[in-house]
């Protein structure tokens, strides 16, 4: 396997739902260490595109490559094992459990343990250490023993990101991590994503509506509209792109 292969390549991916072409001939190349943002109006096909990458459902046509390897035939669980971590547009956590318990469940899943009662002492230590590590990364150490359901929306989202990190992903896919958040929580989650990218060197693909977040974080931006790739470039290029402004303002071109 070539060491210069991009982390993620998508070649001409399409997805039809009946007569609706939700994703239409979209290609993308994300280099190792890059933070790519995907933006676009509601219903543009952003989440569907993530579902193709993660193997939630197969593309109608096109190819997905991870580290240069075609993974079209690899089911979602296999892609997680190959290093794909994901968070969802709607937070998926166990609110009645503590932060520590949530991250431990994620770590155990990542390590292939399913029955906690059967873990040996050494395994339990491994789980605890890995859980402590991801809570630290997500700035949750001081809240480890709080019930997740009682935390702020921002800390709940950070818990979900910590759970994705527990699987030791080499590619992290985040679907609208600041959705529904106020300024303070948006700032908190933006800071967390920036640290994961700049300090911990994660490769991240981020779907995001908040342009402040996108322009603050992204190395490159891909713009989807009506299932198609409308534009791609640096934040400066995208900010100056007339087609993108038209798509966002809903004007006819
Ligand atoms: N499982 C599905 N079955 C049928 N249609 C779907 C399915 N998932 C998405 N769609 C449709 O595909 C189109 C794209 O949806 P998608 O959720 O990918 O958009 P999005 O860009 O993520 O939008 P938003 O910004 O609102 O999250 C929409 O018209 C949606 O109704
Ligand atoms: Mg979506």
Image (spheres, rainbow, N blue to C red):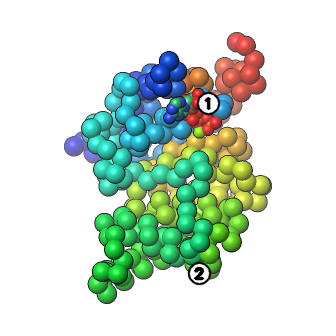
Drawn side of residue 53 relative to residue 2, left or right: right
Q: What distance separates the C-alpha of mark 2 from that of mark 1?
A: 38 Å
- Beta carbon at label 1 within 8 Å of ligand 1: yes
Q: Is residue 194 visible?
A: no
The residue drawn where x is 65% and y is 69% is 149
**From the viewer's perspective, is residue 167 above or below residue 6?**
below
Q: Position of residue 230 (x, y in %)?
A: 57, 22
Q: Position of residue 140 (x, y in %)?
A: 59, 73
Check disc 2 and report its element: helix, strand or loop: loop
Q: Position of residue 5 (x, y in %)?
A: 31, 40
**Residue to which mark 2 is pinned:** 145
Q: In the current view of this chain or complex, which residue is farthest to the top?
A: 253
Within 10 angstroms of label 2, few (less than 14), some, or many (20 or more) residues?
few
Within 10 angstroms of label 1, few (less than 14), some, or many (20 or more) residues?
few
**From the viewer's perspective, is residue 125 above or below residue 84?**
below
**Residue to which mark 1 is pinned:** 43
The residue drawn where x is 53% and y is 41% is 36
Residue 45 falls in which quadrant of the image?
Answer: top right
Drawn side of residue 68 relative to residue 99, left or right: left
The C terminus lies in quadrant:
top right
């Amino acid at each position: 396997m070539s060491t210069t292969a991009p982390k993620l390549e998508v070649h001409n991916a399409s997805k039809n739902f009946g007569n609706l072409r939700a994703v239409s001939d979209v290609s993308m190349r994300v280099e190792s260490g890059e933070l790519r943002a995907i933006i676009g109006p509601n219903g543009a096909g952003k989440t569907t595109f993530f579902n193709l990458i993660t193997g939630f459902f197969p593309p109608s046509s096109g190819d997905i490559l991870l580290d240069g390897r075609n993974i079209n035939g690899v089911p979602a669980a296999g892609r997680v094992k190959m290093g794909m971590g994901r968070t969802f547009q709607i937070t998926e956590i166990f609110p009645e459990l503590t932060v520590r318990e949530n991250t431990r469940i994620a770590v155990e899943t990542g390590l292939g343990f399913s029955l906690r009662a059967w873990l040996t002492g050494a395994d339990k230590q491994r789980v605890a250490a890995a859980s402590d590590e991801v809570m630290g990364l997500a700035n949750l150490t001081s809240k480890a023993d709080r019930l997740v359901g009682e935390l702020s929306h921002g800390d709940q989202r950070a818990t979900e990101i910590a759970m994705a990190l527990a699987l030791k992903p080499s590619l992290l896919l985040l679907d609208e991590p600041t959705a529904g958040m106020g300024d303070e929580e948006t700032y908190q989650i933006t800071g967390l994503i920036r640290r994961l990218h700049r300090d911990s060197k994660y490769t991240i693909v981020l779907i995001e509506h908040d342009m402040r977040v996108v322009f603050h974080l992204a190395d490159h931006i891909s713009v989807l509209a009506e299932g198609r790739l409308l534009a791609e470039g640096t934040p400066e290029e995208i900010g100056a792109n007339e087609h993108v402004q038209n798509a966002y303002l809903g004007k006819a071109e």
